[in-house]
Amino acid sequence: MDFALAYTDEQQRFREEVRAWVAENVPENMKQPVDGREATEEQWRFWREKHREMGAKGWLYPTYPKEYGGGGLTGDHESVLAEEFRHARVPWSGSSLLFATLLVWGTEEQKEKFLPDLMSGEKTTWQKLTEPKGGADLANYQSRAVRDGDDWLITGQNVFISGTPRPEWTPAGPDYMYGPLLTDPDAPRHRNLGYFIIPVPSEGLEIKEMNLLPGHDQHAIFMDNVRVPGDHLIGGEHQGWQVMGAHLEQEHGGRGQAAPRD
């Protein structure tokens, strides 16, 4: 019995288009290193530009809505892209934990504010979850967000935060970090968090690289009264746990995978 996937003529034509683009645009020395510790600033800069080109083609985040900068394509397109990019060592994910979270919980103004720049590859994000004391125990979050007029002041720490670029590269860090913060220490558990998008760089925000055996893509984050605008709170100020549900459903496989690894 033949268990091989059968591709349509249209899918095969799209595959040839993707292969031709890779052959024309990706030199061998810019392909993703097998060992991530060998990645260079030159490669990072190269892929920042190529991701913008892929975003313009609808290939960076292919199945997300066009009106927010996604490709508006099908799961079949994503499967072909995932297979070809993995084979060619093209750094690519096709999704982001923040996107569906914003689509479910964000206001229309927030979707229009954040999604187009992110889906086009103009801006990048890191998720900000693990803390030094509680690890991944998000229901016991310690980092605080305190109201100050229309803004919030954020104080706290995170560790083992993954991402590139490295701190000595320019620009250093992502454009945004996102995740929960304690907004009301007197409220009941699961009703005491907010979910925030934090601009980077910001005054009072420091990113330090953690020198670990697996490589250089883990960071410690320090926040000391970092001012965040009110419209960077996604959902209500007591709904962070519920917003995290949409975030974690994807992280734990709820979105599925277009082309699972062998």
Image: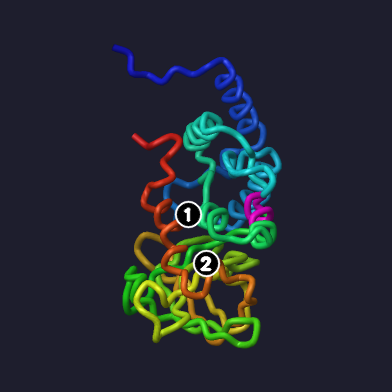
**Where does residue 188 sit, x and y in percent of width and height?**
36, 79
| Of 9 and 107, the residue lying toward us | 107
Q: Residue furthest top?
A: 1
Question: What type is the residue that disc 2 sits on?
Answer: Tyr
Residues under labels 2 and 1: Cα distance?
A: 27 Å
Q: Is residue 217 visible?
A: no
**Where does residue 57 sit, x and y in percent of width and height?**
68, 38
Which residue lies at the image location 36% right of the left edge and 70% below the top edge? Answer: 138
Quarter of the image with the C terminus is top left
Q: Is residue 67 left or right of residue 19?
A: right
Q: Is residue 149 visible?
A: yes
Per the image, label 1 sits on a secondary structure element best described as: helix
Which residue lies at the image location 68% right of the left edge and 56% below the top edge? Answer: 117
**Magenta segment, which residues?**
115-121
Q: Residues within 10 Å of mark 2 (few under 14, many from 20)?
A: many
Quarter of the image with the N terminus is top left
Q: Is residue 191 left or right of residue 106?
A: left
**Where does residue 227 sit, x and y in percent of width and height?**
61, 82
Q: Are marks 2 and 1 in contact (CB under 8 Å)?
A: no
| Of 91 and 145, the residue lying toward us | 145
Q: Which mark is residue 178?
A: 2
Q: Is residue 203 left or right of residue 132?
A: right
Q: Residues within 10 Å of mark 1 (few under 14, many from 20)?
A: few
- Residue 117, above or below 237: above
SS assignment for the magenta stretch, majority: helix
Residue tagged by mark 1? 38
Q: Nearer the viewer, mark 2 or mark 1?
A: 2
| Of 111 and 135, the residue lying toward us | 111
Per the image, label 2 sits on a secondary structure element best described as: strand
- Residue 229, above or below 128: below
Which residue lies at the image location 60% right of the left edge and 23% below the top edge? Answer: 16
Q: How is the image coloured?
A: rainbow
